[in-house]
Amino acid sequence: MRTRIVAALAAPLLWNNWLLPRLALDRRGRTAAGALAATGYALAFRGRPNWFSARGTAAGMGCVALVVAGYTVASAIPAVRRSLSGAGDRAADVSTLEWVALHIPLGTVYTEELIFRATLDPLLDKQFGVRAGTALGSAAFGLWHIRSARVAGDSVLGTVVFTGAAGLVFGTLRRWTGSATAPALLHWSVNAGGALLTRSASAAHGEPAGPNR
């Protein structure tokens, strides 16, 4: 059992931080490869996302409403808009529609929620208990982002801490609802809302905002 747990912990980190970058795929290739890898991982380790959960959907939609409200308030603050306009575009090679409707939900949300909340977290909870499982799962989610932080030129430590904290929130939602639906909806709304807000702020200040905005 310990060997299986070690493999379950190590596989995502090796995939995202070592193997996937070496495949040298474009964005569409990375999205497809990530989704396929996540599906294979869930099958190998018997993940149970429970996507069609009424409780998970209700909780997730509540989270979406909060995120939308937060972004609406933020967009009304001139200082925030100015800051976002110079933040840089993380997906300048694709249109806003493709980014928000394909790469974020499939390449980020589906991939990460299937691996971490639907598969790894339940394994860790069963092996170590909820408290330790929560800590380990959140830490693994933070470490998953090492490579992306380096590519973006962000602080690796800051990124690991921030995404680890996000993993704690996502994991708590999954444990509370018994479904990966709620964290997936929250995850998508935060990322998609941030993408839309950044590009709209850039467009308002005359900055390029990706092809076919």
Image: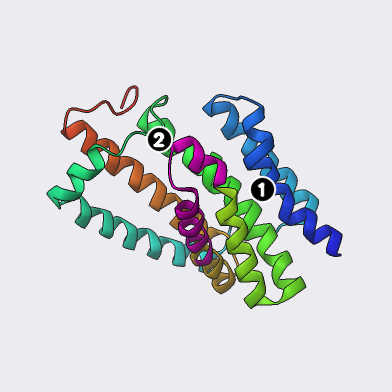
- Count of numbered circles on the image: 2
Q: Name the residue under label 2.
A: 90
**In the depicted view, which residue is nearer to us: 52 or 196?**
196
Above or below, comparing residue 147 to residue 28 in the picture: below
Is any atom of residue 185 visible in this view?
A: no
- Tell me: 91 left or right of 52: left
Q: Quadrant of residue 36?
A: top right
Q: What element carries label 2?
A: loop
Task: Report the span colored magenta.
Answer: 146-168
Percent across and percent down for residue 198 are 29, 40
Above or below, comparing residue 66 to residue 207 in the picture: below
Q: For the residue marked with disc 1, what is the amino acid?
A: Leu
10 Å crowding of disc 2: few (<14), some (14-19), many (20+) = some
Percent across and percent down for residue 25 are 60, 25
Q: For the residue marked with disc 2, what is the amino acid?
A: Arg
Q: Tell me, yes or no, whether the highlighted magenta stretch contains residue 126.
A: no
Q: What element carries label 1?
A: helix
Q: Name the residue under label 1.
A: 13
Residue at 36% x, 32% y: name it.
96
Above or below, comparing residue 79 to residue 97 in the picture: below
Q: Earlier in the sequence, mark 2 or mark 1?
A: 1
Q: Magenta region, mostly helix, strand or loop?
A: helix
Percent across and percent down for residue 150 are 50, 39
- Tell me: 180 left or right of 12: left
10 Å crowding of disc 1: few (<14), some (14-19), many (20+) = some
Q: Tell me, yes or no, whether the highlighted magenta stretch contains residue 160.
A: yes
- Tell me: 151 left or right of 7: left
Residue at 38% x, 32% y: name it.
97
